[in-house]
Image: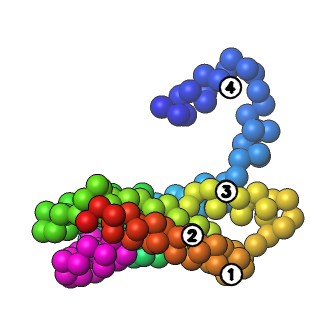
């Protein structure tokens, strides 16, 4: 569908296709394709689900431990695995956790959401915006390595995860 619309727009605007294709960030697009293939293979083989079930379904019935576990494991995993497939995989796991031990006011869902979102800032591959930003930096002559990015992003990610932990713990304490 997207290619059809692109062809229609090229026809209407009479843009030079070769010039437009030179401006496309091919390395970024190919990286995304490879990342989604890798995550898809991990999903297909059940790796993500196995990790999720073996970590999350063994934490017991303490709501504070459950919320912190979901928040921090989701945060760390989202730094290295694309957050969308990880979150989709976690939905049935969180449902199972809630069936076994109900936690009020969607706190466990908030933990998953905050962990996946904030943890995506940990590495270059944690979020799509990070990948695009690093590609733009590279194109403008300021390349940044995976480890350099992580060195600068890790303190902010950890601090934001600590703040989220405190907020969720206070919220849980108020409503339990």
Label 4 residue SS: helix
The tag on residue 160 is 2
Q: Quadrant of the C terminus?
A: bottom left
- Position of residue 110 measured from the top left corner of the image (x, y, whole percent): 38, 59
The tag on residue 151 is 1
Front disc: 2 or 4: 2
Whether residue 101 is visible here, answered yes or no, is yes
Q: Estimate the spatial distance between the alpha carbons at disc 1 and disc 4, rounded to whole Å.
A: 42 Å
Q: Earlier in the sequence, mark 3 or mark 1?
A: 3
Q: Estimate the spatial distance between the alpha carbons at disc 3 and disc 1, rounded to whole Å.
A: 18 Å
> Horizontally, is 35 left or right of 8 in the view?
left
The tag on residue 10 is 4
Q: Earlier in the sequence, mark 2 or mark 1?
A: 1
Q: Estimate the spatial distance between the alpha carbons at disc 3 and disc 2, rounded to whole Å.
A: 22 Å
Secondary structure mostly seen in magenta is helix
- Position of residue 150 measured from the top left corner of the image (x, y, whole percent): 65, 77
Q: Residue furthest left?
A: 100
Query: Which quarter of the figure has residue 131?
Result: bottom right
> Horizontally, is 160 left or right of 14 in the view?
left
Label 2 residue SS: helix
Decide: is 84 above or below 45.
Answer: above
Q: Estimate the spatial distance between the alpha carbons at disc 2 and disc 1, rounded to whole Å.
A: 15 Å
Residue occupying the point 48% across, 31% down: 1
Decide: is 171 above or below 11.
Answer: below
Q: Estimate the spatial distance between the alpha carbons at disc 3 and disc 4, rounded to whole Å.
A: 24 Å
Front disc: 3 or 2: 2
Residue topped by disc 3: 132
Residue occupying the point 18% across, 63% down: 102
Crowd around label 4: few <14 · some 14–19 · many ≥20 (10 Å): some
Magenta-drawn segment = 49-70
Residue occupying the point 76% across, 27% down: 15
């Amino acid at each position: 569908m997207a290619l059809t619309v692109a062809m229609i727009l090229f026809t209407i605007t009479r843009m030079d296709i070769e010039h437009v294709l030179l401006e496309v960030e091919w390395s970024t697009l190919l990286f995304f394709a490879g990342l989604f293939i890798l995550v898809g293979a991990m999903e297909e083989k059940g790796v993500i689900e196995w990790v999720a079930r073996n970590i999350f379904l063994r934490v017991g019935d303490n709501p504070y431990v459950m919320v912190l576990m979901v928040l921090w494991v989701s945060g760390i995993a989202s730094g290295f695995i694309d957050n969308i497939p990880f979150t989709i995989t976690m939905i049935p796991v969180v449902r199972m956790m809630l069936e076994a031990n109900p936690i009020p006011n969607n706190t466990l869902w908030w933990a998953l959401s905050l962990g996946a979102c904030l943890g995506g800032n940990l590495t270059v591959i944690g979020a799509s915006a990070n990948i695009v930003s690093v590609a733009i930096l590279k194109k403008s002559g300021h390349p940044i390595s995976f480890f350099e990015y992580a060195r600068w992003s890790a303190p902010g990610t950890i601090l934001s995860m600590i703040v989220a932990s405190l907020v969720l713990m206070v919220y849980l304490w108020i409503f339990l």
